Amino acid sequence: MKFCKKYEEYMQEQKEKKNLPGVGFKKLKKILKKCRRSDHLPSRIASISQQHGNNCPRECTVCDGTFFPELQKEMEDVVGWFNENAQKLLELHLASSFKKCLTWFTGNTRKTTHLGLIQQGKDLVNYALINAVAIRKILKKYDKIHESSQGQAFKTQVQKMRIEILQSPWLCELMAFHINLKESQKECGAVLASHPSLFGGGCSFIFDDGKPFLSCELSDSVKVDIDLTCSICLDTVFDPISLTCGHIYCYMCACSAASVNVVDGLKTADPSEKCPLCREVCVYKGAVHLDELSILLKRSCRDYWEERCKTERAERLQQAKEYWDYQCRSFTGL
């Protein structure tokens, strides 16, 4: 089955359950067909244009007025819906017993059960990945028709705008959440119905050459791997945090990179401070604590986690002592 048909069937099935945004795959393909008929340059002019690094004509209405604005709006809607619903689900999972009881009394019993939570997490991860594939394929189609690299340039642009769904920290959290609940489900002896046609490989926590990864695989051989090695301390992330650019670090390593004390936290970081990897600015204030990933790493790497706990506790106490000593001196003027 072609991906376009598969995607349309998937989105139609999801929309019957709940109204959710998606990529207008068919509509965007029709726009590109129209562009091929009317806006594509003759081969001789295209060849000259390619030599000057401008493969797509500036007057192309598809580039300037229809295709990219339409796709950007759809990507914003998809990422916004995904982030909002993933955050709600994870908050419910980590909520207090009182809040869970409140949810149960309001009639949302299915949402608080292991099977219900696992299924919702699995559906959200699948939604993110299949939409990411749809966006990748339509941009590849665009570049093929225009004999250009404008599609890839647009992908880089949306990554900087932080509307690339595979960059979302909530995707990483959902993958960890799914594995955590799956393990809890095994302990309870329950059985979860799977969807092999759309989510064949599932989510898993693996070590490759000694490096930890979160891995998620779709049935059409599309695989996403999230590296869980902190690029600052070069060890498995501890108390992980995701910056708004999508890169994951240990919390204390991120504080060090942002030149802030662990007591003040990353919200006090100067906007000019950059991500150590991609060198983007303004990435610390909106950082997300990856609580589900912390639970997963604590369960999967017990010895390492206990050792880091001891080390970090001592470091945090030292930083806290220095911080309050400084505050006392500033207050008393000594």
Image (cartoon, rainbow, N blue to C red):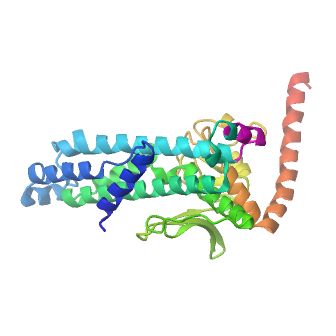
Residue at x 29% of width, y 52% of height: 25
Question: Which residue is more in the foreground, 48 or 85?
Answer: 85
Residue 142 position, x and y percent, is 25, 55
Question: Which residue is more in the foreground, 11 or 61?
Answer: 11
Residue, far bottom: 209
Instruction: Reply above or below: 224 against 68.
Output: below
Q: Quadrant of residue 297?
A: bottom right
Instruction: Reply above or below: 209 against 322.
Output: below
Taking 331 as reference, is 46 left or right? left
Dividing the image into 4 quarters, which one contains the C terminus?
Answer: top right
Taking 44 as reference, is 14 left or right? right
Instruction: Reply above or below: 121 against 96.
Output: below
Question: Which residue is more in the foreground, 265 or 93?
Answer: 93
Residue 183 position, x and y percent, is 69, 64
Dividing the image into 4 quarters, which one contains the N terminus?
Answer: bottom left
Taking 317 as reference, is 132 left or right? left
Q: Quadrant of residue 9?
A: bottom left
Residue at x 89% of width, y 28% of height: 329
Magenta residues span 94-103
Taking 30 as reference, is 284 left or right? right
> How many labels, in total?
0
How would you classify the magenta stretch by its main secondary structure?
Answer: helix
Residue 59 seen in the figure:
yes
Residue, far top: 332
Residue 84 position, x and y percent, is 54, 40
Residue 283 position, x and y percent, is 57, 42
Inspect the magenta stretch and tell me whether residue 131 lies in it.
no
Residue 247 seen in the figure:
no
Residue at x 89% of width, y 35% of height: 325
Residue at x 53% of width, y 49% of height: 168
